[in-house]
């Protein structure tokens, strides 16, 4: 059977269109494949084991950009990880602390996704500036999860604690596991820093400042971490991630030096412009006893801003992440670019 000439041309034309379509689809798929995400952000319970796996995977994929250290152990012997992005020998350092409060664990995902994004764009520009140039002069030090024990409690209940002494004690403390803010010893890690500390409350889900300032292993580890970095260079600022409320703490009280006030103002104005979060009034040091931000501002003379992401009550649902990501994806690298 012979095909007419017109029909042959039609078949050839159809084959060409199909080939072009396949090439177009391949072109669309290839960038996504090359940028396949390690950090998953489409589910709610981002666990400790997932965090550890992602840190290892990022370091393996980006060995020249990502380094990590264990700065200490939690009460329940989970590692407290520091992830360093960029040049660890840089003269300037920006710190990022997330997940001080257990139920605010979406901040772990946010931090890890930021790290991956900056690695993917290391040799590209963000806000018309080369990421590699910024990270060559300002190293970014992340503590993605400052409270892994409390997060395990919020995600999986008191049974997630392996230490029998504290597992038993937790059952007699106030507050349910799902909305737990404290660590495994029932101490609020954002009330245990050695700044205007005063005893208040009792062990439970939230608010207890501990038996003394810096009594908790997590806080002790972070204080050592800050002091170690300061010996190597200048800490230019701290970004602290909490949730919820979509608000921003950036104002300084009278105790802050003029230089700290100036740099903190620059930081919060940038954060305000990127996120649209509402700026909160200055907190008095007597009200914010034992808080991390006051510790950095008034005891260590380091500029510091705190961002409260999300709107709903914590733990935040996975559906909130896209909005949080849109506002915060470039925030940390943009803050580094200020310096």
Image: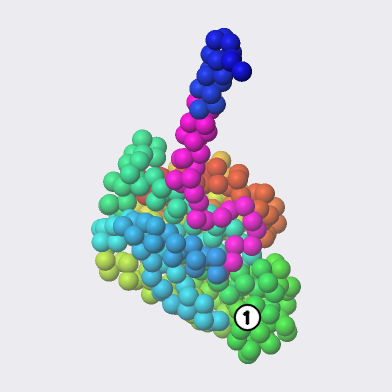
Residue at the spot of label 1: 161
User: What is the quadrant of residue 163 in the picture?
Assistant: bottom right
Report the front residue among 219 and 103. Answer: 103
The N terminus sits in image quarter: top right
User: Could you say where residue 196 lies in the image, as x and y percent from the top left?
Assistant: 50, 71
User: Could you say where residue 102 lies in the image, as x and y percent from the top left?
Assistant: 61, 68
Report the front residue among 303 and 87. Answer: 87
Q: Is residue 27 above or below residue 43?
A: above
Q: Residue farthest to the bottom?
A: 165
Range drawn in magenta: 20-48
| Colour approach in the figure | rainbow
User: Could you say where residue 81 lies in the image, as x and y percent from the top left?
Assistant: 45, 69
- Mark 1: which secondary structure? loop
The answer to if 36 sits in the magenta stretch is: yes
Residue 291 horizontal side relative to residue 162, left or right: left
Which residue is pictured at 48% across the width and 45% down the height?
A: 33
Which residue is pictured at 56% across the width and 19% down the height?
A: 11
The answer to if 273 sits in the magenta stretch is: no
Which residue is pictured at 71% across the width and 68% down the height?
A: 178
Q: Residue farthest to the front?
A: 1
User: Could you say where residue 188 lies in the image, as x and y percent from the top left?
Assistant: 59, 72
Question: Crowding near pointer 1: few (<14 within 10 Å), some, many (20+)?
Answer: many
């Amino acid at each position: 059977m012979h095909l007419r000439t017109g029909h042959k041309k039609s078949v050839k034309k159809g084959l060409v269109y199909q080939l072009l379509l396949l090439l177009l689809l391949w072109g669309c798929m290839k960038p996504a494949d090359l940028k396949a995400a390690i950090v998953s952000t489409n589910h709610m319970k981002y666990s400790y084991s997932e965090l550890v796996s992602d840190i290892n995977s990022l370091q393996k994929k980006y060995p020249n950009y990502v380094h990590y250290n264990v700065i200490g152990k939690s009460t329940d012997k989970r590692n407290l990880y520091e992830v360093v992005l960029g040049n660890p020998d840089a003269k300037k350092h920006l710190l990022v602390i997330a997940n001080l409060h257990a139920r605010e664990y979406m901040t772990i995902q946010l931090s890890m996704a930021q790290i991956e994004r900056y690695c993917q764009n290391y040799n590209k520009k963000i806000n018309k500036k080369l990421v590699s140039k910024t990270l060559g002069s300002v190293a970014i030090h992340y503590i993605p999860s400052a409270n892994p024990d409390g997060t395990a409690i919020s995600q999986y209940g008191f049974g997630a604690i392996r230490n029998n002494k504290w597992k038993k004690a937790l059952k007699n403390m106030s507050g349910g596991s799902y909305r737990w803010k404290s660590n495994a010893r029932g101490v609020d890690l954002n009330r245990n820093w050695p700044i205007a500390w005063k005893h208040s409350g009792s062990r439970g889900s939230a608010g207890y400042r501990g038996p003394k300032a810096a009594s908790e292993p997590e806080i002790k580890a972070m204080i050592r971490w800050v002091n170690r970095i300061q010996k190597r260079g200048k800490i230019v600022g701290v970004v602290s991630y909490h949730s919820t409320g979509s608000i921003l703490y950036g104002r300084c009280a009278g105790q802050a030096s003029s230089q700290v006030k100036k740099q903190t103002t620059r930081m919060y104005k940038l954060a305000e412009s990127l996120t649209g979060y509402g700026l909160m009034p200055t907190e008095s040091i007597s009200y914010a006893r034992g808080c991390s931000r006051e510790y950095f501002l008034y005891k260590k003379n380091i500029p510091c801003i705190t961002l409260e992401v999300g709107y709903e009550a914590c733990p935040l649902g996975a559906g909130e992440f896209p909005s949080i990501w849109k506002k915060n994806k470039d925030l940390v690298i943009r803050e580094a670019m200020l310096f």
